[in-house]
Image (tube, helix red, strand yellow):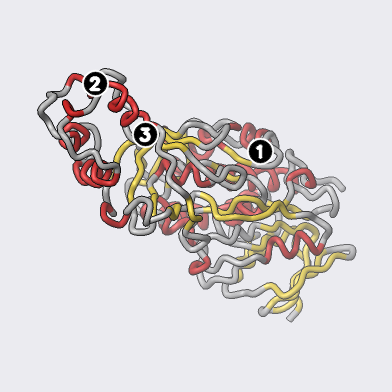
Amino acid sequence: MKFPVSDCIIIGAGAAGLFCAGLLSKQHKSVTLLEHNAQPGKKIRISGGGRCNFTNRIVKAQHFISENPHFAVSALSRYTPDHFINLIESHNIDYHEKTLGQLFCDGSSQEVIDMLLSECNTSYCDISYGTKVYSVRKAENFTIETSNGTYQAEHVIIATGGLSIPSLGATNLGYQIAQQFGHSIIDTRPALVPLTIDREAFPCADIAGVSLPVEVSAGDSPIFKESMLFTHKGLSGPAILQISSYLYKQTSMIINLIPNVDADTMNERSSKTEWKTVLGQFVPKRLAEVWTTLHGQTDTIGHYGTKTLESFKHDLQSWCPEIYGNEGYAKAEVTAGGVNTHELSSKSMMSNLIDKLYFIGEVVDVTGHLGGYNFQWAWSSAHAAAQSIAEYHG
């Protein structure tokens, strides 16, 4: 079956694709949205524990990682968190703010999906689910061969996402299309992902489930001051997910397990108290027991001299566990790397190589920190592309 030529075809009905379709259809642009899953927004549905951390109140360039670090600024400055918050409020979706500016739905993530679908003007927007894309060609217009027939459009937007969470249908289609049209791909890798560590050097499985506030950094990365969670395989929690995105250039990290303990606090404790008991006043008791046993610190605090105590504190404030790797795309919240942004327009998200071909969202080499930043990039990049197409004059 061959369909009429539309103004735009969007491949991928995730956050970026859905939002872009809504924006274009409201501009009375004919849009066909192709999605290989049976339903839209699968990653939206599971995000934020099912409540969708849809943006962050504070969004700056330093919240994003890219080989081209200033690329995201243009799109983010033209479609801000306030714009999306206004949209959420216009649909009467209740939300709340958690730590560090993170905004979540009071109810379900499904509310965001329903909102995005309702923003699509059905007179101009057609969504085709369960549709696999076989090929994309360009002559005067783009021609896309699919399992549902042949589609044609003047503009094509690639919103296929990355490789994270393959159980939800993630594929490398977007990267393949980019390379077909001459684009280079910045090496992809799991990001915002739990880390695995040497369990013989540190028996993390013995304290799986224990969490505590930490400070963690790697090389010239930001210092993340959030919670860390011990798992059976290693480390997770917000602080670890954050630093994981920076461990492609650095192979080690430094963790401060007692960030709120000053130099004299431990020395003030009773000299007759066991070291693990003292430590247990600053970190979870199970961690204190494992740490002191592992380091042979089984005596009372009075048994140790000042220099030894200082050394103990230094070890706690500068822990460098040996990283084996990470838990891969199956557990990664996003994919870092992607379509090289040096080959895209930061204003429109259009390819510098192929006229009227666009890339938005996670498929692009822009990766946000944990906390709603990747959704904001989806909204902002989609808005940039939609605005460009709406104003396109050839």
**Quarter of the view holding residue 12:** bottom right
Q: Which quadrant would the N terminus be assigned to in this image?
A: bottom right
Helix, strand or loop at label 2? It is: loop
The reply to whether dot 3 and dot 1 touch (C-beta < 8 Å) is no
User: At which x and y percent is residue 202?
Assistant: 35, 50
Helix, strand or loop at label 3? It is: helix
The residue sitting at the left extreme is 272
Residue 72 marker? 1
Disc 2 or 1, which lies upstream in sequence?
Answer: 1
Residue 154 drawn above or below residue 274: below
Question: Marks 3/1: CA distance?
Answer: 38 Å
User: At which x and y percent is residue 331?
Assistant: 46, 59
Nearer the camera: disc 3 or disc 2: 3
Nearer to us in this view, 35 or 280: 280
The residue depicted at 31 percent of the width and 20 percent of the height is 263
Q: Which residue is mark 2?
A: 265
User: At which x and y percent is residue 86?
Assistant: 48, 37
Question: Marks 3/2: CA distance?
Answer: 16 Å
Question: Marks 2/1: CA distance?
Answer: 44 Å
User: In the figure, is residue 205 to the left or right of 360?
Assistant: left
The reply to whether dot 2 and dot 1 touch (C-beta < 8 Å) is no
Q: Identity of the amino acid at label 1?
A: Ala
Helix, strand or loop at label 1? It is: loop
The residue sitting at the right extreme is 140
Q: Which residue is mark 3?
A: 315
Disc 3 or 1, which lies upstream in sequence?
Answer: 1
Q: Identity of the amino acid at label 2?
A: Thr
